[in-house]
Amino acid sequence: MTSLLRIDSSLRTDGSVTRALTGAFADAWEAAGGDVVARDLQSAPLPHLPYFGLHFPASENDPAQWDVARALQNEVIEQVKAADALVIAAPLINYSVPSTLKAWMDYLHVPGVTAAPVPEEGPLAGKPVVIVSPRGAAYDEPGAETRLDHAVPALTALLGDALGMSVEAITVDRTLANLLPELDPAKAETLLDAALAMATQRAAELYAQLS
Ligand SMILES: Cc1cc2nc3c(=O)[nH]c(=O)nc-3n(C[C@H](O)[C@H](O)[C@H](O)COP(=O)(O)O)c2cc1C
């Protein structure tokens, strides 16, 4: 079966835009005939990467106290390797990804293991990744400070540039409109509907491409 790894990282369950988007993606994937493996980094967070040396391949000289974290790292890596595609929730949290997602990224990136000198030749090369990234503010305004979004660029640098995966992103702005009326709730709803439709469409297209 063609397998999707769904990674959630929203701080909330009720009202989460990313969970609605990863959910729509996963539902469309399953409707097409695929299976879905879920990892929720908010309800089951990884500890921060505890040792500098874990950024590098395991060796027989590694101290025994690294073993638990190394096992966790292997599990993270094997889960990504086993998936045919990934959908990753990356809500913009203080201009970047949630710290839970950052920890997952830190476990995954191991030069010589997941990252090859030529990224296109690495073990994850070409694997499709769809990032869904809501932003509370109106980055779609003319002149908006899009440089302040360090979520999609950081994930793309790691998964795409370093690991050679095939990365695309679905962003949706104004998700705080229900709390801040100046963000135009009607416009926010239209943007969300479009993003949900896009998530459903991309899941079906990617599944068809991979099956
Ligand atoms: C702690 C925190 C920090 C946030 N920082 C930003 C930010 O820097 N820029 C922004 O546009 N929205 C920011 N937001 C709003 C979230 O991006 C927005 O609510 C998004 O929809 C959250 O994802 P979720 O709906 O899946 O929970 C922040 C929200 C929280 C809770």
Image (tube, helix red, strand yellow):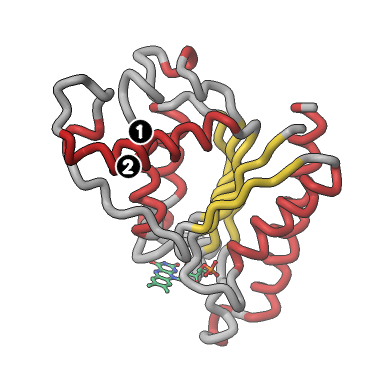
Q: Residue at x 14, y 32 (%)?
A: 63
Q: Position of residue 194 (x, y in %)?
A: 74, 60
The vertical placement of 208 against 29, above or below, is: above
Drawn side of residue 26 relative to residue 108, left or right: right
Q: Residue at x 74, y 35 (%)?
A: 206
Determine which of the numbered discs, if any, sits on residue 148 in the image. Answer: none
Mark 2 belongs to which amino acid? Asp
Give yes or no for contact between labels 1 and 2 (Cβ–Cβ under 8 Å).
Answer: yes
The vertical placement of 18 against 27, above or below, is: below
Residue that numbered label 1 is attached to: 109
Give the secondary structure at mark 2: helix
Q: Position of residue 38 (x, y in %)?
A: 60, 51
Which one is in front, 34 or 75?
A: 75
Q: Position of residue 71 (x, y in %)?
A: 35, 38
Q: Residues within 10 Å of mark 2 (few under 14, many from 20)?
A: some
Residue that numbered label 2 is attached to: 106
Q: Residue at x 80, y 47 (%)?
A: 30
Mark 1 belongs to which amino acid? His
**How far separated are the C-alphas under marks 1 and 2?**
6 Å
Q: Position of residue 167 (x, y in %)?
A: 55, 35
Give the secondary structure at mark 1: loop
